[in-house]
Image (cartoon, grey):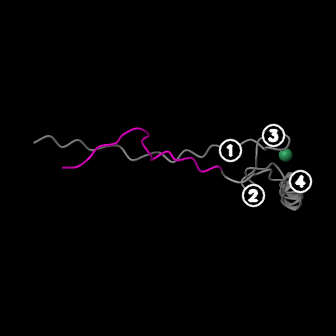
C-alpha cells in the first residue's frame, strides 16, 4: 500500500507590487499601496473606457474549410 499524502498547498501571501508606483502593496488596497494609487488606476480604466478606439474592419472570412481541386466522386 503506497499512500502518498501530498502536503497541502501553502497559501503564500505575496504582496503584489503597486502597478502605479511599484511600491509594496498593502492588504487594504492591494495590489495597490494606497487608496490614491487605486484611484489612479481606476481613473485610467475609466479614461480608457471613454476612449474606445477599435479599428476593426470587416472580418474577411476566407474559405478555410474548402479544399480546392479535390474532386472526388463517391461511387
Ligand atoms: Zn502606489
Q: Nearer the viewer, mark 1 or mark 4?
A: 4
- On whether ligand 1 comes within 8 Å of the CB at mark 3, the answer is yes
- Rate crowding at label 1 as few (under 14), some (14 to 19) or many (20 or more) other CA atoms within 10 Å: some
| Image coordinates for residue 58, horizontal then vertical, percent | 71, 54
Q: Earlier in the sequence, mark 1 or mark 3?
A: 1
Residue found 23% across the figure and 49% down from its top: 74
Q: Is 69 part of what is drawn in magenta?
A: yes
Q: Is residue 50 left or right of residue 29?
A: right
| Image coordinates for residue 70, horizontal then vertical, percent | 36, 40
- Rate crowding at label 4 as few (under 14), some (14 to 19) or many (20 or more) other CA atoms within 10 Å: few
Foreground pick, 11 / 61: 61
Residue that numbered label 3 is attached to? 23
Q: In whole angstroms, how far apart are the C-alphas of marks 4 and 3?
A: 14 Å
Please, what secondary structure does the residue beneath circle 3 have?
Answer: loop
Q: Is residue 10 left or right of residue 22?
A: left
Residue found 81% across the figure and 48% down from its top: 33
Q: In whole angstroms, how far apart are the C-alphas of marks 1 and 2?
A: 11 Å
Residue that numbered label 4 is attached to? 40
Q: Is 34 part of what is drawn in magenta?
A: no
| Image coordinates for residue 48, horizontal then vertical, percent | 85, 55
Please, what secondary structure does the residue beneath circle 1 have?
Answer: loop
Q: Earlier in the sequence, mark 2 or mark 4?
A: 2
State the quadrant of the N terminus.
top left
Assess whether mark 3 and mark 1 are in contact (beta carbons under 8 angstroms): no
Q: Earlier in the sequence, mark 2 or mark 3?
A: 3
Foreground pick, 62 / 47: 62
Q: Which residues are magenta?
A: 60-75
Please, what secondary structure does the residue beneath circle 4 have?
Answer: helix
Please, what secondary structure does the residue beneath circle 2 have?
Answer: loop
Residue that numbered label 1 is attached to? 15
- The label on residue 35 is none
Q: Earlier in the sequence, mark 1 or mark 4?
A: 1
Amino acid at each position: 500500500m503506497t499512500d502518498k499524502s501530498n502536503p497541502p498547498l501553502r497559501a503564500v501571501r505575496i504582496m503584489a507590487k503597486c502597478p502605479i508606483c511599484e511600491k509594496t502593496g498593502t492588504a487594504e488596497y492591494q495590489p495597490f499601496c494606497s487608496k490614491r494609487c487605486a484611484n489612479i488606476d481606476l481613473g485610467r480604466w475609466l479614461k480608457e473606457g471613454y476612449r474606445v478606439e477599435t479599428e476593426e474592419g470587416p472580418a474577411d472570412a476566407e474559405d478555410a474549410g474548402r479544399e480546392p481541386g479535390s474532386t472526388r466522386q463517391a461511387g
